[in-house]
Amino acid sequence: MSNGPVDYVAKTPVCLQIGDAATNSLRPGVCVTDIVFPNGKPIKIQKISFKNYYTAFLSLRLLRSEEEGQDGAKWVTCLRNFPLMANPHDEAGSQDYFSVSRQQGAAMTAVPREWCVGTGACLRYLMCQATTAPMLVEPDDVTSVRLILRQPSSAWLNFNIEEITIYDCVNEDTERDVPAWLSSLTPADEPLHLQGLPDPETVSSSIQQMWALTEVMQSSQTTASVGRFDVDGCYDVNLLSYT
Amino acid sequence: MEPVLVTMDEETELSFTIAQMVQRLKGTHLHSQLERQAKDCLHRPDIKLESLKDDVRNFLKVSGWERKLQNAVYRELHMPPPGSPAAPPQHTKEPLQYMRNAQASWEKRILKSLNSMCTELGVPLARKRPLPEQRELSNKWNEMGTDEPDLSKFRPVYAPKDFLEVLVSLRNPNLDCSEELSSLSHWGLIKVPLHVRDIPQVREACPELTLTSGQLGIDDHPHVPSDLFESEHVRLGRRVLGEQDSAAAQQYSRQGCPTGLRAQLWALILNSTNDPEDIMHYEQLKAGVIQHDLVVDNLIYKDVKLTASNDDYYFVFEDFLYQVLLCFSRDTTVLEHFNYNSATPPKSYIQGKAEQDEYAVIYPPNGVIPFHGFSMYVAPLCFLYNEPCRLYGVFREMYVRYFFRLHSISSHPSGIVSLCLQFERLLQSHLPQLFYHLREIGAQPLSIAFKWMVRAFSGYLSTDQLLLLWDRILGYDSLEIVAVLAAAVFAFRAENLMEVTSLASAEAVLADLSTLKVMPLIQIFVFATMI
């Protein structure tokens, strides 16, 4: 569904402060970073993933170029105050990985409650951290992304977002042409001159069966270990290694 | 049963999680048993070809195999979930960089200590036992306690107080410590701002412990008529065992397990089986003990002799402890838990062939170097199980779910760092005078309570009370109750503690916990404290 990561240029983060930056002794609690794409080409974003570093809330705004016929570009809010840290003063979520992806339709699917065994352990297991967030708008024709980071707690010295990776959509419209050499396969009209050779149909079906067996073997490979800790019966260890 | 709504993204995450779980369960004995059952049931007359899939499924449900599968899935749900695809494996072990660094340098200290001890004593870390020695050990397997090897030169690799020093020195480099009296002023020793629950949140998380709800440990007292709570609870416990439902057993355990049913209930909660396959695995471990001699074995011997053998409750189980702990050291299946443990197993090379990958091994085979007091994790379980194989299975499962968190540095809510911080915050919030007084006389509360929490109170409480506490650890799938109990003990002895004037007298007041009843203490501290 998504291509590899897209190149981008991240501008220097700008911290918003009240009053004069030089005389203000309080640390800023809001930081804004702009991301532009090279060549000015608009991107259809599939997913943005990043690693948090002590940012409490993230807002995303996208600069979308308008449709043809209209001038100018519009800023829209894609994510509003998404909480990365459950409590801005605590460590929870402070160095976690997150991703924001395009909403895949607005459909909701029902999960039978029998799956949620016992004390709701299943739901807890999955939803223990909301590490993925859906976007509020369709991120099509995006020329710039603005990340607004907020960290209201005075406990932390710095906060930002690292390892930002943006994935764009695979273009599903292009059809690849069948190469010319593929279309010139021999049509099966001419009778085959078998001279003592087995019928190709039976040969191909038995080969298919063997292939199916190997597929079953491959797919049922397990990660269970045998349990041996020695190397060929030898476990003579002198000292532990530090590396 | 009404369905739960999830979004498309969550559905993708759900299918990813399910695929991973299926992959993990595929290698287990249960998988091959289910396949065999499904194949065998095809002979039955009630299985029709037209509705083959549904009939086989129905058969598995009726014969109890679906419940076994449910229990296995439930067990997998208890393991920490795999991290998000973008996160590297060390992030799944421990998300915070500075904690990973602290754990790595702590481990390096342990390795150095073990290496220098071996060099001093001139013994290799591991060697193959000569055949006569193997035969001798095999004969003495059931009475290893009678052996009196010379352990005087061996010393424990570390003690809990060394570990406490490391935890106290943990610092987050991004934390602003410039203001002395900030709103987050904290009188305790732990200086990292982890998220811990306070009393209102503990009340919300543990509604089954409330004053109006029956508890074993309170309402099974001889003076309380048993038909008020106890007999009904025991009846319910028998039913839960009849259904063989792990999830129900866990929920049941929150109000305590009756003594007669506890062994089976804990095995059910932990999904620990005693099939021929498990017995065979245990025999394989035993063979590993007999064939190879490890220095770690001497550490275990020394630890058992110093702790469990000196304890009035546990000295009779000395032989069992060796049989369990020595086999535990050889168990490579324990290595799986390092995926979500911030610790890393120590590595070495056989025959001195350093840096050559084909000779790389993990030492000890299970990656866990025991410390002083480690055998106390096993000792209370000896009251429940009298077969070493069964005892071993339950202990191993409890270790990879809970106990490992008590001696590794991590930010997990059940990790020892969070427990220490929770204990200090609870005490400071609800007994500030006591905390201040103890701090002033140089008796930081954590310095006294740490040794209790590291062992989950094993060896400090009387056994029946300890087992009631561990019922709740299993029931709530969390070690938080240990921190709550530690604070409750201080609250109980607050009057005496306010009168002491030195660390030694404070320790004397809290030296003997064997008369305490844990459930009333916890109930009063959590539900009867004025907020």
Image: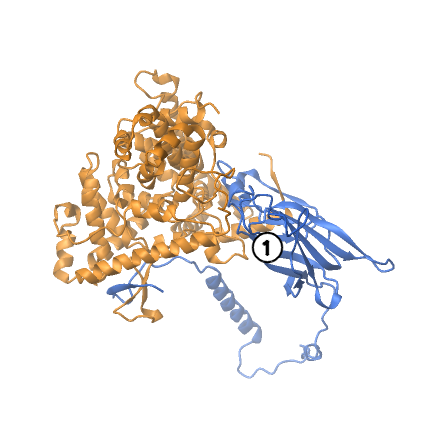
| Left or right of B304, for residue B428 | right
Chain letter of the residue beneath label 1 in the structure image:
A
Residue B214: x and y in percent read 41, 22
As displayed, is residue B125 above or below residue B425?
A: below
Answer yes or no: is residue B78 visible: yes
Residue B137: x and y in percent read 15, 54
Please state which of residues B108 and B496 is positioned toward the viewer in this rendering.
B496
Label 1 environment density (alpha carbons within 10 Å; few <14, some 14–19, many ≥20): some
Outermost residue toward the right in this view: A69
| Left or right of B265, for residue B84 | right
| Left or right of A237, for residue A98 | right
Q: Please give the name of the residue rendered at 52% of the width and 37% of the height, measured from the top-left corner.
A: B183
Please state which of residues A190 and A38 is positioned toward the viewer in this rendering.
A38
Residue B441: x and y in percent read 32, 33
Q: Secondary structure at mark 1?
A: strand
Write down which chain is painted blue: A
Q: Looking at the picture, which amino acid does disc 1 mark?
A: Ile
| Left or right of B216, for residue A166 | right
Name the image quarter holding residue B354.
bottom left
Name the image quarter holding residue B132.
bottom left
Residue named by callout 1: A161
Q: Please give the name of the residue rendered at 41% of the width and 52% of the height, measured from the top-left corner.
A: B342
Count of numbered circles in the view: 1
Write down which chain is painted orange: B
Outermost residue toward the front in this view: A23
Question: Tell me, what colour scheme is on the image?
Answer: by chain
Image quadrant containing the N terminus of chain B = top right
